[in-house]
Image (tube, grey):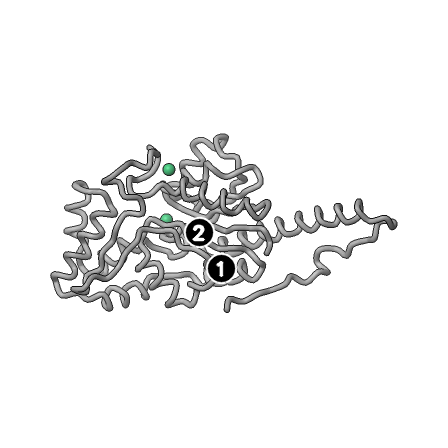
Amino acid sequence: MAGIIVVFDFDKTIIDCDSDNWVVDQLGATELFERLLPTMPWNSLMDRMMKELHSQGKTVEEIADCLKKAPLDPHVIAAIKSAYAHGCELRVVSDANLFFIETILKHHGLLEYFSEVNTNPSYVDEEGRLRIFPYHDFSTSSHGCSLCPPNMCKGKIIERIQAQASVDGKKRFIYLGDGKGDYCPSLRLSEEDYVMPRKEYPLWQLICDNPQQFKAEIHEWSNGEELERILLQLINRLIAVDRKNAAQVFSVDCKFETIPMPPNEALPLPLRVPH
Ligand SMILES: [Mg+2]
Ligand SMILES: [Zn+2]
C-alpha cells in the first residue's frame, strides 16, 4: 500500500450533480421539496420525499433507474481506478445516503474500489419505501460542531479515519470535495496532506476567503479531466517522496558504499485491481 488515503465527497465531486436534487427533480417532486426545505433539515426532508414518492406509486426500482442516469465523468472513473491501482486506500464521506451512493457506484463498477462509504444510513422497508436516516442521531444529542449540519460532521469522520489509519504508521490524505460540509474535514488535515476543492464551488470560496487557516496544500480542479490529472500528480508526488525517504534510510543503514538507486521513472508501479 502507498500509505495514501484518498477521501472523496460524493455529490458534485464523484458524480457531477447532487444525487438528492437529481432524484427529486427527475421524479417530478421539485416543487414540494422546495416548499418543505425551509421547514426541516435536509436529511429529514429526503426521508419525507421518499415517503411522498412512494405514496405516488414510485418504486425503489424507479428511483434506482433514475440514479443510474446521474452524470459521472469518465475521467472521474479513470481517476478512481488509477488511484486504487497505485495502492491508495479510497473512501467516500458523503451527506447523501447509502442507497443512492451504492446504486450509482455499483452501476459503474466502482463500489469495490472503496474500502468504506461513510454516509447517512438508508434501507427499504417492508412496504417498499426507501427510508433515509441521519448519520448522527441529532434527536438524542448534538455532534457539537457548529460548522456542520446536525446529521453529520464530516470533520469528526475524518478524525476517526485519521486515528484508525495512524495505527499502521504514517498516512497522507488527499481530500476532494465541493461543498460547505467539506470545509470542517479540510480544516483537520495536516501540512503533509492535500485538499482538492472544486473551483468556484462553496468549499473553494471558503478556502479563498481565509486560506491561512488551512494546513494542507490546496489544489483546485474544475472538471473530471482536471480532477484525474491533478489527483494522479499528487499521488505520484507522494509516492516519489516515499521512495526517496526509503532510499535514504537504505543508504544510511547499509555498511557498503551508497548503492545508486534507479530514478523513480525506472521503477514500475505495482498495479492492482479489486477482487
Ligand atoms: Mg458535494
Ligand atoms: Zn464539523
Q: Residue at x 53, y 43 (%)?
A: 194
In the rendering, which numbered label is found on residue 8? 2
Name the residue at the left extreme: 55
Q: Residue at x 86, y 48 (%)?
A: 255
Residue at the image point whose x is 82% and y is 53% from the top = 260
With respect to residue 271, does 19 lie above or below?
above
Label of residue 80 in the image? 1
Q: Are marks 2 and 1 in contact (CB under 8 Å)?
A: yes
- Give the mark nearer the N terminus: 2 vs 1: 2
**Front residue (pair 160, 233):** 160
Residue type pointed to by label 2: Phe
x, y percent for residue 63: 24, 64
Whether residue 125 sits left or right of residue 121 in the image: it is: left
Asked where in the image residue 183 lies, by quadrant, the reply is: top left
As helix, strand or loop, the secondary structure at mark 2 comes to strand
Marks 2 and 1, Cα distance to the nearest angstrom? 10 Å
